[in-house]
Amino acid sequence: MKKRVITFGEIMMRLSTPGFARFTQVDSFNVLYAGSEANVASSLSHFGISAAHVTRFPNNDLGQAATQTLQRYGVDTQFIVYGPERMGVYFLENGSMHRASRIVYDRFNSAFAHVKPGMIDWELILKDASWFHWTGITPAISQGAADVCYEAIQVARKNNITVSGDINYRRNLWQYGKTAREIMPALIESTDVIVSGITDMENCVGISGDTFDTACASFKKSYPNIKKVATTERNSISSSHNKLKGILWNRKQLFQSKEYDLTHIVDRVGAGDAFMAGLIYGMINKKDDASTIEFATAAGAFKHSVEGDVNVASAEEIETLVKGENIGKLLR
C-alpha cells in the first residue's frame, strides 16, 4: 500500500514571547512558521511517512521562509502556490502555572484566504496519495478556502483515497457570511476519519450527546461514511500541568488510551496536530484500534515537551513512550 499523505491549510508566522514573558513585557519575538495541517505533515515526515503540504503563500521573502521551514521538516512543497497578498500572523504568550496562555490572531486578507477553485491541480497532487487531511480551520477562513477544500475531498473520494478531518470549531474565524453548519456537513459526509469533541459536533453539524459514545452513535446515523471518530480528553490543572488521554470509536466499540500526567509543560500548541498525525500513522500502518489510539495519544503527550508547533519526534520515540521505557533518562 502507498504511504503518502497530502495536507491542505493555511500556514502563519508565529511570533511568541521569549520564555514565559507577557506581551506587555517584550521588545522582541521568536519567529516560527506553522499551521495545523502542516504540523500534521511535518510530524508524519518525522515518522517516516511521505507527506506533502498544499497552501497559498505570499510571493515574497516571508512566503519563501515559510516554504523553507517545511522543507527542513522533510515536507514536499512542490505544490504550494503563491499570490500577492500577505502572510497571516499569530502572537503567542506562553502561560505558566495558573496563568493561561494567550493567542492573538492577525490573519485577515492573507494569501491563503484568497485561494480559489481551479488554482490547485488536485488530480495531479493526489495521483500518488493514499491519504488526504483537512481541518475545520480551513473552511472557516473564506468561501474560497471552503470551496477548494471541498474540491480536494471530492477528488480524493473519486480516487479511493482515505480522507481525515479534524473538525475543530473556531468560532471567531467564521466571519465571511457563512456559518459552520452551512459549510461543514458537506465536507464531513465525504470524510472517513474524524477528530471531534462533543462541542465540535454540536457547533458544526448540530449533533449532541451526553457522552462521547452517544454523540458518536448519532453521528453514525447522520454520516454513514464515517468509519472512525477520535478525540482527546484534557484535564487542565494549570498551564504547566495537564492530564491527557485519547478515545477512539470505530462504529462498534470505544477504545481509551492510558492517561498521561503532563507536568512542567514546555509548549502545548500543536498537541492536537501531533495526536492527529499519530492516528494517521497508526491507521496507515494497519495498527489495530487499541494500538492506534495509544500511539496517537503518546504522540500528543510527547509534543508537550517540544518547543514550537511541530512534534519533532521519531516513531521509535513515540513507541518507546507507549511502552513506558526510557522516561526522563539520559540516553548516550
Image (spheres, rainbow, N blue to C red):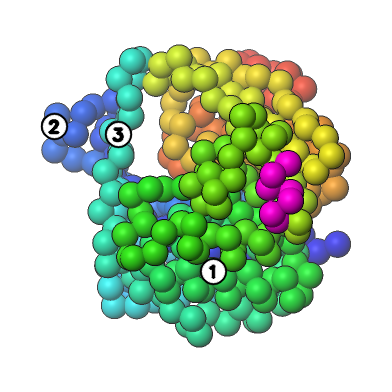
Can you give x and y, in whole percent of width and height, for residue 122 in the image?
61, 78
Q: Residues within 10 Å of mark 3 (few under 14, many from 20)?
A: few
> Taking 32 as reference, is 160 above or below it?
below
Q: Nearer the viewer, mark 3 or mark 1?
A: 1
Q: Judging from the image, what secondary structure is the residue with disc 2 in?
A: helix
- Image point (39%, 52%), residue name: 33
Q: Disc 1 residue type? A: Cys
Judging depth in this view, the residue of 88 and 160 nearest the camera is 160
Q: Which image quarter is the N terminus in?
A: bottom right
Q: Is residue 197 magenta?
A: no
Counting residues from the start of the chain, the first of labels 3 and 1 encountered is 3
**Relative to residue 175, is residue 23 drawn left or right?**
left
Q: Nearer the viewer, mark 1 or mark 2?
A: 1
Q: Disc 2 residue type? A: Thr
Q: Judging from the image, what secondary structure is the residue with disc 1 in?
A: helix
> Taking 259 as reference, is 75 above or below it?
below
Q: Would you say the magenta stretch is mainly helix, strand or loop?
A: helix
**Segment colored magenta:** 217-223
Residue 106 seen in this snapshot: yes
Q: Residues within 10 Å of mark 2 (few under 14, many from 20)?
A: few
**Relative to residue 26, is residue 154 drawn left or right?**
right
> Label 3, label 1: how many angstroms apart (C-alpha)?
29 Å
Judging depth in this view, the residue of 13 and 165 nearest the camera is 165
Residue 50 seen in this snapshot: no
> Label 3, label 2: how many angstroms apart (C-alpha)?
12 Å
Q: Which mark is residue 149?
A: 1
> Taking 241 as reference, is 85 above or below it?
below
Query: Which residue corresponds to mark 2?
Result: 24
Counting residues from the start of the chain, the first of labels 1 and 2 encountered is 2
